[in-house]
């Protein structure tokens, strides 16, 4: 159970040292843009480091979309980011579940996820594991509520994708955190990474606003319990100024 943080992409190794992180997660391109990832200047050092690396794909990616102008470039970017993630020695690529519009049939969005894996399987698979992350809002989101995650896994489970449990997202989506690890594993069979974030907003708000562990609306002891039950690597995506304290808090509580 290694613990780390989402850090700045320009100097991830320096950021890891500042925080005492055993794991780092970062972007390889503008998270709000469609540009292809470029070679990272610390690629060689990252591959040689004993720090575990995860890459987060851009937020704009939505492979579920029924809009060809969104879905097709989204598929392309997932493949590109997986290759770029492999180049820095990453253990996985985090991809949000995405959504369809209010008037669309969610089943078509789920089918689009399957097509992504089918097409890439025909090409030999992804360069690193794709890890699907639960999200906070949207009635027609593919991974907001666990009932929809179950439907998604019916489509893609045979391709053995990974799963990322974000505690703030689950709380905002109206999923009780007590017992959530068992409920997720009953669906996916696994939790590959925990995004351990408190929330600035109340339960069921659908708002994705992260808080440092001691300062949000989720009981910190409940967050610790989620980590202990998941027994998976932990990344805090909390405000940067408090990340070192968040990591130290978790290490103390988890006996790490």
Image (cartoon, rainbow, N blue to C red):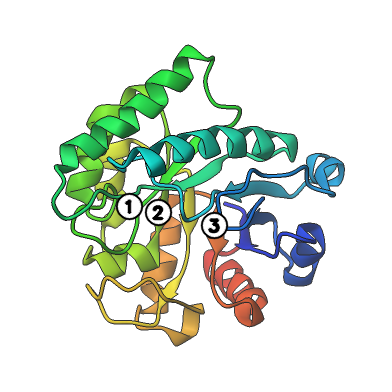
Q: Secondary structure at mark 2?
A: strand
Residue at image location 56% in from the left, 55% down from the top? 33
Q: Which mark is residue 234?
A: 3
Image quarter hosting the C terminus: bottom right
Outermost residue, bottom side: 215
- Contact between marks 1 and 2 (CB within 8 A): the answer is yes
Residue 236 image point, x, y percent: 55, 66
Compared with 240, 227 (above or below) is: above
Total number of numbered labels?
3
Quadrant of residue 207 within the rendered picture: bottom left
Q: Residue at label 2?
A: 165
Q: Give the label, 1 or 2, closer to the camera.
A: 2
Position of 8 with respect to 161 (left or right) is: right
Residue 198 image point, x, y percent: 43, 75
Residue at image location 22% in from the left, 72% down from the top? 204
Q: Residue at label 1?
A: 181
The front one of 102 and 44 is 102
Distance Cα–Cα, label 1 vs label 3: 14 Å
Residue 133 image point, x, y percent: 40, 50
Q: Secondary structure at mark 1?
A: helix
Residue at image location 75% in from the left, 63% down from the top? 16
The front one of 185 and 228 is 185
Quadrant of residue 105 within the rendered picture: top left
């Amino acid at each position: 159970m290694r613990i780390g943080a989402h850090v700045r992409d320009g100097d991830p190794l320096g950021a890891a040292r500042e925080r005492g992180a055993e794991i780092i997660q970062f972007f390889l391109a503008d998270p709000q843009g469609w540009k292809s990832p470029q070679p990272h200047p610390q690629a060689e050092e990252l591959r040689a480091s004993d720090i575990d690396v995860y890459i987060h794909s851009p937020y704009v990616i939505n492979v579920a979309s029924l809009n060809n102008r969104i879905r097709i470039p989204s598929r392309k970017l997932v493949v590109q980011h997986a290759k770029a993630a492999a180049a820095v020695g990453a253990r996985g690529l985090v991809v949000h579940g995405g959504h369809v519009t209010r008037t669309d049939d969610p089943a078509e969005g789920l089918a689009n996820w399957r097509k992504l894996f089918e097409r890439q399987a025909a090409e030999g698979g992804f360069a690193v594991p794709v890890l699907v992350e639960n999200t906070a809002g949207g009635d027609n989101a593919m991974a907001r509520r666990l009932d929809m995650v179950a439907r998604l896994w019916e489509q893609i489970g045979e391709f053995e994708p990974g799963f990322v449990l974000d505690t703030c997202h689950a709380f905002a989506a109206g999923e009780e955190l007590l017992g959530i690890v068992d409920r997720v594993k009953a669906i996916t069979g696994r939790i590959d990474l925990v995004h351990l974030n408190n929330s600035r907003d109340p339960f069921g708000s659908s708002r994705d606003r992260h808080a440092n562990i001691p300062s949000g609306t989720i009981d910190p002891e409940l967050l610790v319990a989620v980590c202990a039950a998941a027994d998976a690597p932990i990344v805090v995506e909390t405000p940067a100024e408090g990340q070192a304290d968040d990591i130290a808090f978790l290490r103390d509580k988890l006996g790490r």
